[in-house]
Structure formats: C-alpha cells, structure tokens
Amino acid sequence: MIDIDWTLYANLINFLLLVFLLNMVLFRPIRNALRERQAKMLAQEVDINLLTDQGQSLEDEIKEKLAAARRDGAGARETLKQEGAQAEASLVDEVKRQVEVEWATVEKKIKADMAKARASLETQAQSFANLLATKILGRDLS
C-alpha cells in the first residue's frame, strides 16, 4: 500500500516546481513563438491578398489600355491607308498626265520624222523608178 509521509509531499512539491520551471523556461517561449508566427502568417496573408487584388486591378488596367491602344492603332492604320491611297491616286494621275504630254510630244516628233522620211523616200523612189526603168528598158527616159 501507499504510505503517506513526507516524501509524498516532497515529490508533489518537486513536481509542481518542475512544472512551473518548465512552463517558464520551455512552454511559454514556445507558445509565444507560435503566437508570433501565427500573427506574422496572418499579416502576410493579408498582404498577399492585398497584393493579389492590386495585381489583378493592374492586370485589368493594362488589358484595358492595351485594348485602347490596339483600337487607336487600328484607327491610325486605316487613316494612313486612306491617306496613302489618296497620295497614290494623285501620283498616278500626275504620272498619267505627264506620260500623255510626253506621248503627244513624241507622237508629233514621230509624225514629223515620218513626213520627212516620206518626202525623202518619194524623191528617192522617183529617182530609183527612173533608174530601174532605164535599166529594164535599156534606154534613157526623159
């Protein structure tokens, strides 16, 4: 059986003293470290949520700006295409007009050269005809 004497009280005091000292030295610092870690994790989680929301809003803003820039670019491209088409049409018209003027000048020159050549050939043809007739007939044509 268990005898209740002074050793039981000494062990009880020893146990309580040990629990008190372990609580002061070991358990309380660990619990404080766990609380601090939990608080840091909660603060970081709040920061993460805040930064995620900010990142999402920035991403949405970037997408909107990109879409607006694409629309502006498409409008500017269409404007430039129209200006280019108008410039091309005016250049083509100017070149056509210059070609027509030059063609008229060249055509006049060709007609004048043809007239000179005809006149020259007519005089030569007459003399060739006389020469040929003289050779064929064997006598002078006068």
Image (cartoon, rainbow, N blue to C red):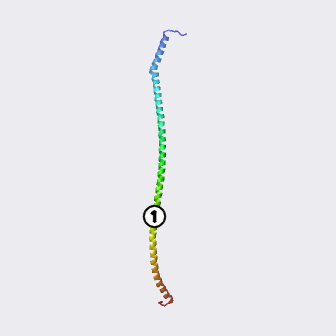
Considering every residue shown, the one lying at the far bottom of the view is 139
Q: Residues within 10 Å of mark 1 (few under 14, many from 20)?
A: few
Q: Position of residue 138 (x, y in %)?
A: 49, 90
Q: Residue at image x 48%, y 43%?
A: 64
Q: Is residue 110 above or below residue 138?
A: above
Position of residue 107 measured from the top left corner of the image (x, y, whole percent): 46, 72
Residue 114 position, x and y percent, is 46, 76
x 47%, y 18%: residue: 19
The mark tally for this picture is 1
Q: Is residue 33 above or below residue 109?
A: above
Q: What element carries label 1?
A: helix
Query: From what the image shows, is residue 134 above or below residue 63?
Result: below
Residue drawn at the location 47% of the way across and 60% of the way down: 89
Q: Which residue is drawn at 45% across and 64% down?
A: 95
In the foreground, 45 or 69: 69
- The residue labelled by disc 1 is 95
Report the quarter where the N terminus lies.
top right
User: Residue 97 location, x and y as percent?
Assistant: 45, 65
* Figure check: 115 above or below 83: below
Amino acid type of the residue that numbered disc 1 sits on in the rendered structure = Val
